[in-house]
Image (cartoon, rainbow, N blue to C red):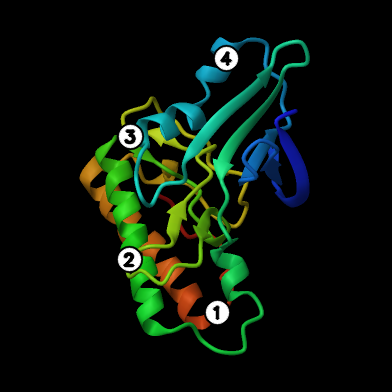
């Protein structure tokens, strides 16, 4: 961590906190995800699902880029260094008085679809897609500016069941309740339910708290 200067705290979750930091050598800014758990070895670190998934999915224009893994063996501390984005989707829609441009919503949905398509082709499903995990950067280019992040809850499509029924986002239920159906049926539900949920939030600029719906991907 000595090569980075901490600037501000970006957010905090159940298992980690995210800091904005600056590389002291080249001046570039990054997002550093500091894990709250401690790890006994570098092998344990390399076996983390999030790290394995990001390495498998990289590079992709709509998947967040993992740039460095910082592991301190004496303390067991772990930090993941990512590219820094401007905001997340929830920050974009929170408290807005005016609706988002329909063309912008269309562009974001298309980019999210591309990230999901790439992820599923690589045999991974996310399980925690929500506005906070969809990162946005300012971009005037059509079809650019959105990246999917936070793969801490992801699983392989063919990984052993059962999956946990609840994940850290308590108002979402995971796909473990419907993966007893065929894989094709499950992936179709991924696209329809998750994208309907996100599209509704972008159009209405409000968060939906849904009880007993299966929203996953």
Q: CA gap, disc 1 to disc 2?
A: 21 Å
**Crowd tier of the residue under label 2, counting other residues whose Cα lies within 10 Å: few below 14, some 14–19, many 20 or above:** some
Q: Where is mark 1, residue-wise?
A: 205
Depth check, mark 1 against mark 2: the one in front is 2
**Crowd tier of the residue under label 3, counting other residues whose Cα lies within 10 Å: few below 14, some 14–19, many 20 or above:** some
Quarter containing the N terminus:
top right
Q: Where is mark 3, residue-wise?
A: 157
Q: Could you say whether the residue bearing mark 4 is in a helix, strand or loop?
A: helix
Q: Where is mark 2, residue-wise?
A: 143
Q: CA gap, disc 2 to disc 3?
A: 27 Å
Depth check, mark 1 against mark 3: the one in front is 1
Write down the quadrant of residue 2 in the picture: top right
Q: Could you say whether the residue bearing mark 1 is in a helix, strand or loop?
A: loop
Contact check, label 3 and label 4, Cβ < 8 Å: no
Q: Where is mark 4, residue-wise?
A: 44
Depth check, mark 3 against mark 4: the one in front is 4
- Residue 54 sits above or below residue 61 on the image: above
Please name the residue shown 41% across and 30% down the image: 55
Task: Give the mark nearest the N terminus, 4 or 2.
Answer: 4
Contact check, label 2 and label 3, Cβ < 8 Å: no
The tag on residue 127 is none
Q: CA gap, disc 3 to disc 4?
A: 22 Å
Task: Give the mark nearest the N terminus, 1 or 2.
Answer: 2
Q: CA gap, disc 4 to disc 2?
A: 37 Å
Task: Give the mark nearest the N terminus, 3 or 4.
Answer: 4
Is residue 206 rendered to the left or right of residue 108? right
């Amino acid at each position: 961590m000595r090569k980075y200067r901490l600037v501000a705290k970006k957010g905090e979750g159940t298992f980690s906190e995210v800091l904005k930091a600056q590389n002291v050598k080249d001046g570039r800014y990054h997002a550093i995800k500091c894990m709250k758990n401690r790890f006994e070895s570098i092998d344990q670190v390399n076996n983390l699902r999030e790290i394995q998934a990001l390495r498998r999915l990289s590079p992709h224009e709509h998947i967040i880029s993992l740039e460095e893994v910082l592991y301190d063996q004496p303390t067991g501390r772990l930090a993941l260094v990512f590219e820094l984005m401007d905001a997340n989707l929830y920050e974009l829609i929170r408290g807005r008085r005016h609706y988002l441009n329909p063309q912008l919503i269309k562009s974001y949905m298309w980019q999210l679809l591309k990230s999901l398509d790439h992820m599923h082709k690589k045999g991974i499903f996310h399980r925690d897609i929500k506005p906070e995990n969809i990162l946005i950067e300012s971009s005037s280019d059509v079809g650019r500016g959105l990246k999917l992040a936070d793969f801490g809850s992801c699983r392989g499509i063919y990984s052993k069941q059962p999956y946990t029924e609840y994940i850290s986002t308590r108002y979402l239920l995971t796909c473990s309740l419907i993966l007893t159906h065929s894989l094709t049926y499950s992936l179709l539900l991924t696209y329809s339910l998750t994208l309907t949920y996100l599209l509704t939030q972008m159009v209405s600029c409000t968060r939906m708290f849904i009880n007993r719906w299966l929203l996953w991907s």
